Amino acid sequence: ETGVTQSPTHLIKTRGQQVTLRCSSQSGHNTVSWYQQALGQGPQFIFQYYREEENGRGNFPPRFSGLQFPNYSSELNVNALELDDSALYLCASSQRGITGELFFGEGSRLTVL
Amino acid sequence: AQSVTQLDSQVPVFEEAPVELRCNYSSSVSVYLFWYVQYPNQGLQLLLKYLSGSTLVKGINGFEAEFNKSQTSFHLRKPSVHISDTAEYFCAVADSGGYQKVTFGTGTKLQVIP
């Protein structure tokens, strides 16, 4: 069984740039959620994708967007990067209907300078 | 909307001593409750979950938690900790209907002292 994999693991961007983070969900899972974890904080829900559509969104501006592909992998895109976007971005996959258990990747650590 | 409060940001405890990590939640609907663990430079891993039924839930690595609806609490316990339990622990809540948005607390760092 292949777990959740994320890429890249680390990256550095400058303010105003754009970034794309990628996630391959665990085999058999059809739902992907993205979380932002700032240093010393708990993960904050960004959005969730199911059947290639956004299926719930947290308190994040529209410059945070995403995609889910037919193979259930996903991308998180952030435009016009700000310093406060520096964080660990976590992808979690799950099987809809089996409530609650999220399987997390190890995250992509983004530093915005 | 749900929220989670973890009352302790750090908990130091000696090896082989018992530990309790506290969690309180707020929600206007029925909820599911979870504890996740995060080791350094890793993602989160599910320790245990409460969906329904018995209020005492047993998880991996000898952890257990008790759901108390009247006190809106879901405290995590372990009778004897090991060095390998040093990690950050997150309490989380999801409503029992709708999409699976899981809301996390701010975390408690458990430091096991040899």
Image (tube, helix red, strand yellow):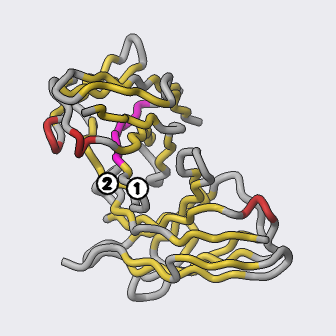
In this rendering, would B106 be left or right of A83? left
Residue A89, placed above or below residue B99: below
Question: Start and end of the magenta stretch?
Answer: B30-37
Counting other residues with Cα less than 10 Å from the Cα at mark 1, is it few (<14), some (14-19), or many (20 or more)?
few
User: Is B35 included in the stretch rendered in magenta?
Assistant: yes
Q: Position of residue B107 (x, y in %)?
A: 48, 38
Q: Which image quadrant: the N terminus of chain B?
A: top right
User: Which residue is the extreme one toward the top?
Assistant: B70
Which secondary structure, mark 1? loop
Q: Amino acid at mark 2?
A: Gln
At x 80% / y 81%, what residue is drawn? Answer: A17
Residue B40 bears which disc, if any? Answer: 1
Residue B83 bears which disc, if any? Answer: none
Counting other residues with Cα less than 10 Å from the Cα at mark 2, is it few (<14), some (14-19), or many (20 or more)?
some
Q: Position of residue A45 (x, y in %)?
A: 57, 54
Mark 2 vs 1, N-terminal side? 1
Question: Which of pointers 2 and 1 indicates the residue nearer the eye?
Answer: 1
Q: Read off the residue under disc 2.
A: B45
Disc count in the image?
2
Relative depth, front residue between A113 and A42 = A113
Q: Position of residue B38 (x, y in %)?
A: 38, 51
Dot 2: chain letter:
B
Which secondary structure, mark 2? strand
**From mark 2 to mark 1, how far is it between C-alphas?**
12 Å
